Image (cartoon, rainbow, N blue to C red):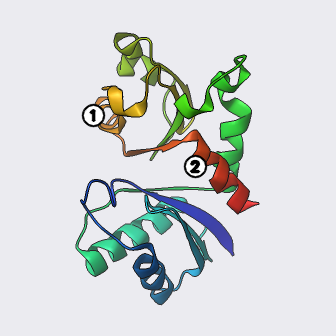
Amino acid sequence: MTTHLALLRGINVSGHSMIKMEALKTTLEAIGFQNVQTYIQSGNVFVDTEEENPAAVGFKIKQEIFKAFGHEVPVVVIGSTDLEACFKNNPFLKEIDIDTKKLYVAFISTTLQSNSMNDLKISQFKPDEASIDGNRIFIKYAVGAGKTRFDQKYIEKKLNVIATIRNWNTVTQLLKMYE
């Protein structure tokens, strides 16, 4: 059995794409996922399955959400090593007196190329900062996620990927749940 973490994008936000986590849990168990566990209403779902391919797991979850709830929901599936890498590779954690409330991680559907940072043109969003690490973008917002144009929609458009962003507190909690 492999434990996967499915990160659903854009559910239960401002009354759009509403899905109750208990209903989602029941739906995913009905199609064979085991030990389904959710964390907060924003769409963080742990599932156990014989399927090892994260993309296949994400596709199955996406299909089932559409069938059961009628919502087209992008899904990025990661493993515990992805979360562990967040702590090991986040360059902003090395800063003295870092305010972790300003730290976010964008999880990307595919591994990014080294030139992807140029495509993002992050300098136009200063003082916000970002750093690419494989299939993650570490973000440090100067003011906050709600007051920037450097968001998931921008990242998706510039890099032609699926992205979903989690704040640092959520990333921390998800790793604890994996352990």
Along the line of sight, the residue nearer the viewer: 112 or 176: 176
For label 1, the SS is helix
Along the line of sight, the residue nearer the viewer: 79 or 174: 174
Reading the image, the residue beneath label 1 is 157
| Residue name at image x 52 percent, y 35 percent | 104
Mark closer to the chain start, 1 or 2: 1
Q: Whole-percent x and y of residue 123?
A: 40, 10
Give the tally of numbered discs: 2
Reading the image, the residue beneath label 2 is 170
| Residue name at image x 34 percent, y 73 percent | 65
Q: Indicate whether 43 appears above or below 21.
A: above
Give the residue type that dot 2 points to: Thr
For label 2, the SS is helix
- Residue 81 as seen in the image, left or right of residue 114: right
Position of the N terminus by quadrant = bottom right
Q: Within 10 angstroms of label 1, few (less than 14), some, or many (20 or more) residues? A: few
Q: Whole-percent x and y of residue 84?
A: 71, 45
Most distant residue in the bottom direction: 30
